Amino acid sequence: MLTADSGSVLRLVEIEGRGRALVASQPLKAGQIVLQDSPIVVYSAFPLVKPQSSASYCDNCFRILFSSANVVPCPLCSHHLFCGPNCLTAATASSHSPWVCQALSRLRDCPSLFSQPLEQQVQARFLIAAYNLALVSPSDFQVLLSLQGQYSPSDAPAAEFLHSLISSVCPPPSLSISIELIAALLAKDKLNAFGLMEPISLQQDGERSVRAYGIYPKASFFNHDCLPNACRFDYLDSALDQNTDVIVRMIHDVPVGREICLSYFPVNLNYSARQKRLAEDYGFTCNCDRCKVEANWSDNETDVIDDNGTIEENEDEEIMEEDNDEQMVASEGDEVGEADFPHAYFFVRYMCNRENCWGTLAPLPPSNDVQSKMLECNVCGNLKSEEDMC
């Protein structure tokens, strides 16, 4: 885990009112990779019986399976598919152990589960993955339990049902489970799971679906900001190895001591939508600089981005003209305060303009300490030159 003396470019601290947070332990440059983290748990986001219309993914690395030529089915159940013998071997020794295979197969045949909301099928997948983690890597299971997330009375019905179901249908060997443990695990999952999205080519009606969820112990310390200074990338279908890792890169320069934040959802959402999502999914109200400004806008003024990704002018916010762009660049050794960072400038420079993408742009990593002039979208992967923004 990150510690104050880990030698990392990030430092783990406690911030009043925000809890654990990651701050820069040295000045950070735009495009700089500040974290690459591997998941301790990855599990499918699909119901136990997937719709036939959905894409197929490897049940170990979650790459999309374009062709059936190299697909290897699980020899025990045939329900789970792998992109090759290597993934099957790796999964059998870890995430798809014989007990996991048996447990998921039994749950597929359990009528009581299918009378519940689809969300509980995905929660059941997570609990099987978490219990398996306790069996194959007890130390990582303790890391999972150490993450933020507290039991909520609203979680009690789901916890009670899933405890009864798993205890009777597929109890994990040599592991004592309880309603309290299930409730705690569900809380950890709710607050810390990162969605690994389907390819944008499979997007329907402007919405992308999640193909899998992963829990990343270091990345879980990033707090939210509605105008983030960093964003995360994943390369599920293109990385040759460790393709389920997440990589966090800086969007722009920040000084030492500044908190590094991600946005937990696309930055185009308006104030009321952001606050609703944060309250329901994460249990807090955002008071970032952007929210403090937009809280005073009317509902019409809040919709800064229209349906086509075009920035709408607002009487309180004017888009920076080209000849004023230089004012946004800090002088050497200086940094523009994030409280003074205009919304419109952020949207023009750092939001992808591909239709229905809503991704965030960050420069490619510097080469030989020279900052790249190309920015990459963390959703669709499109590249955009700084010259195109002029």
Image (cartoon, helix red, strand yellow):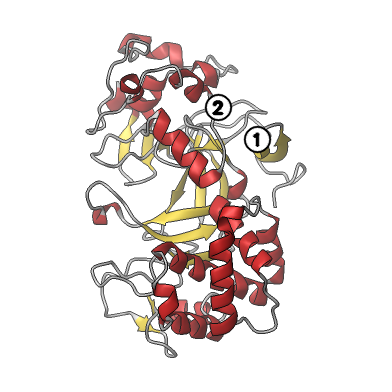
Say which of 340 and 150 sits in front.
150
Q: Which residue is mark 2?
A: 287
The image quarter containing residue 316 is top left
Task: Point out residue 315 in the picture as x, y percentages from the top left corner.
Answer: 33, 10
Helix, strand or loop at mark 2: loop
Q: Quadrant of residue 94?
A: bottom right
Amino acid bearing label 2: Asn
Query: Is residue 197 in view?
Result: yes
Residue 178 percent coordinates (x, y):
67, 71
Residue at 28% across, 70% down: 51
Q: CA distance from mark 1 to mark 2?
A: 10 Å
Whether residue 365 is visible, yes or no, is no
Q: Nearer the viewer, residue 306 or 151?
A: 151
User: Left of 390 or right of it: where is 189?
Assistant: right
Q: Earlier in the sequence, mark 1 or mark 2?
A: 1
Image position of 42 with respect to 23: above or below: below
Q: Relative to 114, is 183 on the left or the right?
A: right
Establish if 1 lies above or below 227.
below
**What residue is rendered at 55% in x and 33% in y?**
285
Q: Residues within 10 Å of mark 2 (few under 14, many from 20)?
A: few
Where is residue 200 drawn, in percent x and y?
29, 52
Residue type highlighted by circle 1: Arg
Query: Percent position (x, y) of residue 204?
Result: 23, 53
Mark 1 highlights which residue? 18
